Image: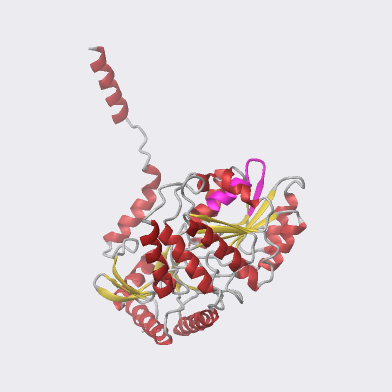
Amino acid sequence: MSEGIAQQDQLVEHEGGTKDLFSKFDDIIQTRETLLASGVEDPYNLVMEKVLSPTRAICNGRDTILLGTYNYMGMTFDPDVLDAGKQALADYGSGTTGSRVLNGTYQGHKECEDALKEFYGMDSAMVFSTGYQANLGIISTIAGKGDYVVLDIDSHASIYDGCAMGNAEIVPFRHNDIEAMEKRLKRIPEDAGKLVILEGVYSMLGDVAPLKEMVAIAKKYGAMVLVDEAHSMGFIGENGRGVCEEQGVIDDVDFIIGTFSKSVGTVGGFCVSNHPKFDIMRLVCRPYVFTASLPPSVVATAATSIRKLMHGSNKRAHLWENSKTLHKGLVDLGFEIGTDEPQSAIIAVIMPDLQRGAIMWEALLKEGLYVNLARPPATPANMTLLRCSLCAEHSAEEVQTILQMFERAGKAVGILES
């Protein structure tokens, strides 16, 4: 009898208003439901039925130009990269089934790290299973309780999550504001551990950080510097080493974080460094120690791609031409662009609001063009963006076709005047 009463009491307690842990997402759920109720196709549930090349895929049964991937250097279908992956798959199997500190380090992992060290001219390299994990692991391990992390307010989610995991004190400053960064550093106790985190290219607007000035200020106040070059590796800088190389500070930063999921064309993340104690990270970095390592086929494709990017000057030049052409063309059509001049392979087209941004996104998809619909809170200043990510494999003719598609779609939905 008492058991039955206890069960009833528990049921009443549950029905009486136990907090739904999903309630924190109600605003996002409502926004999504309102958007879909208007008849717009779900912009975050696109399926590519078949990928034809780095720049084209079949989406919803339609041959579609891809302008919303991070395949900046077009390495996903490079014959040498594919052959390396196939050979590693045949020689080593489909996965390692273990962590890097146990059974998960194969010859290919070492060769991939060697390729990174050669590419950046650095003493040490660590490969992670994702780029997100690279930031999460490195930041949380080197900046802990009592330390201060000074970062750009527009930093990537993985950077913020790394700070939170390490329990460091987060000190944000206004985006790309050199003076604001210095003011924050001045207020930190002189004897405290300090890490300044910057990005070479910021992914939403595609704008570049003033690293030369910022790194100098960081060093002036005794801070270590970490630069995330995820969106600049491969095509910015004489050798494709990113904004650090372009602005002449690659030897002054302490850590460079990057990813394989963009210019390298596969998946994974990494950190390179010249710090003499860096190798201890392999034993103390939890996201590295407690994660299964990348499959042999993945590190083989990454290593091959990285070595080819060392000699990618022609591709880099063509990508820059594509960026300049698209940026000017969109401005001439009357679109509002996130940067005054092209600074990277990312061109952000600013939309009036989420509803009209989604309508424009759908209109472009029906034209046969895929771009990213980026919305708050991921975007700066609550902007809705159509983010265009160019590829070195886009032909000059494709870029002109893209501009024609933007013009027709813009006029059809009222973003441009007819």
Q: Describe residue 230's horizontal placement relative to residue 359 as left or right.
A: right
The total number of labels drawn is: 0
Say whether residue 382 is magenta: no
Q: Residue at x 56, y 75 (%)?
A: 343
Which part of the image, by quadrant, shows the C terminus?
bottom left
- Which stretch is magenta? 135-150
Query: How far across and how far down the image is residue 326, in percent?
Result: 47, 81
Farthest residue to the top: give it.
Answer: 1
Q: Describe residue 295's horizontal placement relative to residue 142 as left or right.
A: left
Quadrant of the rendered structure where residue 417 is?
bottom left
Residue 351 in view here: no
From the viewer's perspective, is residue 130 above or below residue 26? below
Residue 187 in view here: yes
Which part of the image, by quadrant, shows the N terminus?
top left
Say whether residue 142 is magenta: yes
Looking at the picture, the colour scheme in use is: secondary structure
Query: How far across and how far down the image is residue 272, in percent?
Result: 60, 59
Nearer to the camera, 197 or 126: 126
Farthest residue to the front: give it.
Answer: 91
Query: How far across and how far down the image is residue 389, in percent?
Result: 45, 72
Query: How far across and how far down the image is residue 71, in percent?
Result: 44, 70
Quadrant of the rendered structure where residue 395 is?
bottom left
Nearer to the camera, 127 or 371: 127
Q: Describe residue 190's horizontal placement relative to residue 314 as left or right.
A: right
Q: Residue at x 67, y 61 (%)?
A: 253
